[in-house]
């Protein structure tokens, strides 16, 4: 039995408070300012109503893994904002301040196939999973056709396993260069998932090396997307700027959408 809307909103508020407390404690331990961190609520498998509830609590950034789910959800959320008389998010400035009239920022964080680029380019403000040259060309073309500018992060493989996605460290600079040359895309930084079996601190130390390589290409590309529900403290300690939080914020995954 699903909780009522009020019950769910109360649950999300409690979970959000707990996550924010963890982030505050991690920042204090690392000697960092909380303003340096962006919380991305990973809402895969959860309905648009949860996005709207979290937005009402001050969350501005949302992450999705699958275009088949994300595209209709983004449309539903946009319609709800429009019905409420709120301005739609800007679609032509990937570097616009979230506080400047952008009610929701969509982050596409899953593996992206080239045949999905046209759809993703219609709603995503940031794509975290750029890991090959062919994808850069397809996404850039889709962004230009949609009249969009999309911020892109180079996904880094921290263990070299091709099944996980991500570029190996030696390929990161070339991808960064290609992103800077692709009209419609903006190089924003790097993203990675700490592999199972590797201590998060070690994994994120490797990511920092790739982050520095990307900044050699574009000094403004300072985003480090790292850290999830189980390892956010290690990510904060290692200098992450964006935390992708799902389970701790929304609960255990289940077949909730639909």
Image (spheres, rainbow, N blue to C red):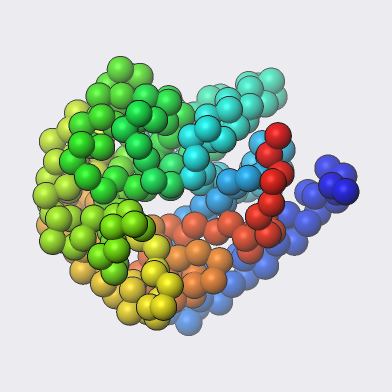
Q: Residue 184: where, in percent of width, then height?
A: 25, 28
Q: Is residue 215 left or right of residue 191?
A: left
Quadrant of the image containing the C terminus: top right
Q: Is residue 174 visible?
A: yes
Residue 241 appears in the figure: no
Query: Number of marks in the image?
Result: 0
Residue 94 position by quadrant? top left
Asked whether, in this view, residue 5 is left or right of residue 102, the answer is: right
Left or right of residue 245: residue 163? left
Report the front residue among 182 and 170.
170
* In the rendered image, the vertical position of residue 102 relative to residue 190, given as above or below: above
Q: Residue visible at 38% across and 78% down? A: 198
Percent x, y of residue 125: 41, 36
- Judged from this view, the residue extending furthest toward the front is 163
Q: Residue at x 43, y 57 (%)?
A: 242
Q: For residue 93, which quarter of the picture?
A: top left
As drawn, 105 above or below 153: above
| Residue at image coords 32%, 40% | 151
Left or right for 225, reference 174? right
Question: 60 above or below 31?
Answer: above
- Closest to the observer, 105 or 32: 105
Residue 100 place in picture, x, y as percent: 47, 36
Q: Residue 182 location, x and y as percent?
A: 17, 33
Residue 115 higher or lower than 212, as above or below: above
């Amino acid at each position: 039995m699903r909780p009522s809307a009020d019950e769910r909103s109360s649950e999300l508020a409690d979970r959000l408070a707990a996550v924010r407390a963890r982030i505050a404690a991690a920042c204090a331990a690392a000697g960092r300012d909380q303003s340096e961190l962006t919380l991305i609520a990973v809402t895969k498998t959860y309905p648009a109503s949860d996005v709207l509830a979290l937005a009402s609590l001050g969350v501005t950034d949302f992450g999705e893994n699958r275009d088949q789910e994300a595209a209709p959800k983004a449309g539903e959320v946009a319609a709800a904002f429009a019905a409420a008389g709120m301005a739609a998010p800007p679609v032509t400035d990937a570097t616009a301040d979230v506080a400047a009239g952008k009610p929701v920022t969509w982050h596409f964080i899953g593996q992206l196939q080239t045949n999905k680029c046209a759809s993703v380019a219609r709603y995503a403000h940031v794509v975290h999973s750029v890991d090959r040259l062919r994808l850069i060309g397809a996404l850039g073309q889709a962004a230009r056709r949609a009249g969009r500018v999309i911020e892109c992060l180079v996904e880094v493989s921290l263990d070299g396993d091709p099944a996980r996605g991500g570029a190996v460290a030696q390929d990161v600079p070339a991808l960064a260069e290609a992103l800077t040359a692709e009209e419609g895309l903006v190089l924003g930084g790097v993203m990675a998932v700490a592999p199972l079996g590797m201590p998060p601190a070690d994994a994120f130390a490797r990511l920092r090396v790739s982050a520095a390589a990307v900044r050699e290409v574009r000094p403004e590309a300072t985003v480090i997307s790292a850290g999830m529900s189980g390892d956010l403290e290690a990510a904060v300690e290692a200098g992450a700027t964006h935390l992708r939080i799902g389970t701790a914020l929304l609960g255990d995954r289940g077949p909730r959408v639909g």
